[in-house]
Image: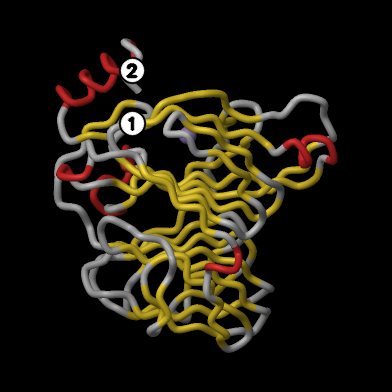
Amino acid sequence: MKKIAKITRKENGHWVGDGFPVRTLFSYHHDGAAVSPFLLLDYAGPLEFAPADAPRGVGFHPHRGFETVTIAYQGEVDHRDTAGHSGTIRPGEVQWMTAARGVLHEEMHSAEFTRKGGVFEAVQLWVNLPAADKMTDPRYQALTLDTIPVVPVDGGTVRVIAGDYHGTKGPAHSVTPVNLWDIALKAGGKLALNVPAGHSAMLLAMRGPVRINGQEIAGSGELAQFEPNGTHIDIEAVGDAALLFMGGEPIGEPIAGYGPFVMNTQAEIEQAIADFETGKF
Ligand code: MN
């Protein structure tokens, strides 16, 4: 059994730009190596937006040294970056952006969502890169619905975004081993997750509650973080549940971070700031 290390129940929210009302449910600032290879999880919404004339969101900003993984659940995100990529992330779709040595991008509500309004709900996960990959070329993977396999389970489904779920492989190419599973369970549904020994593991309950390992309960908007030892997690949906499982092999390297830059040393952070200020992104 993989024991629960803690459950994060209440986090104060903040806004990213004027489009994304997020709660940061884990971050390397607070959780350090325990969440490696991940750096941060922002859960946005669910929140109702009124129709508007101008798209809400966050304008051009840099990233260096890691990957941003955006999953839209309700509403749509339009993005553009300086590596020449643009598109719309629709409900159920995933954008896996490898910022590596650096991109500037903007993330906005789509034109249609802005015009119609509605409920917005999304996740953004930051995945760290090992030192050898931090200054490689930026890359970009747009994972549409038809590319993400859906595995039927007792009382629900598991969509395999990255990694391997009982032999079904996800389409995302991660640099280090990562499992990212998007889970839907009807009330009463049960699921046994097998996780490689030594991997970090976090379970976000977007809808719940769920009973974990026969005891602890995680409700809507709560996050369970597991200990590195153990390979088995039992989940039982108490109510209709929507869950995101994140796990991976820890990257055993020092972390130096400042805002949108996450490197290994302070000197590399100062270089990132200097490169940004002199227009090298
Ligand atoms: Mn960004």
Q: Residues within 10 Å of mark 2 (few under 14, many from 20)?
A: some
5 in relation to 48, above or below: below
Residue at x-position 56% and y-position 86%: 153
Residue at x-position 63% and y-position 85%: 155
* Residue 272 place in picture, x, y as percent: 26, 22
151 in relation to 48, above or below: below
Amino acid type indicated by mark 1: Gly
Mark nearer the N terminus (2 vs 1) = 1
259 or 237, which lies in front?
Answer: 259
* Residue 269 place in picture, x, y as percent: 23, 24
Q: Is residue 199 left or right of residue 141?
A: left
Q: Is residue 61 left or right of residue 237?
A: left
Q: Most extreme residue toward the bottom, as rendered?
A: 154
* Residue 109 place in picture, x, y as percent: 68, 37
Residue at numbered disc 1: 102
190 in relation to 224, above or below: below
Residue at numbered disc 2: 276
- How far apart are the alpha carbons under marks 2 and 1? 9 Å
Residue at x-position 42% and y-position 45%: 97
The total number of labels drawn is 2
Amino acid type indicated by mark 2: Phe
Cβ–Cβ below 8 Å for labels 2 and 1?
yes
Q: Secondary structure beneath disc 1?
A: loop
146 or 118, which lies in front?
Answer: 146
Q: Most extreme residue toward the top, as rendered?
A: 278
112 or 236, which lies in front?
Answer: 112
For residue 92, the mark is none
The quarter holding residue 21 reads top right
The quarter holding residue 118 reads top right
Residue at x-position 45% and y-position 29%: 82
Q: For the C terminus, which image quadrant?
A: top left
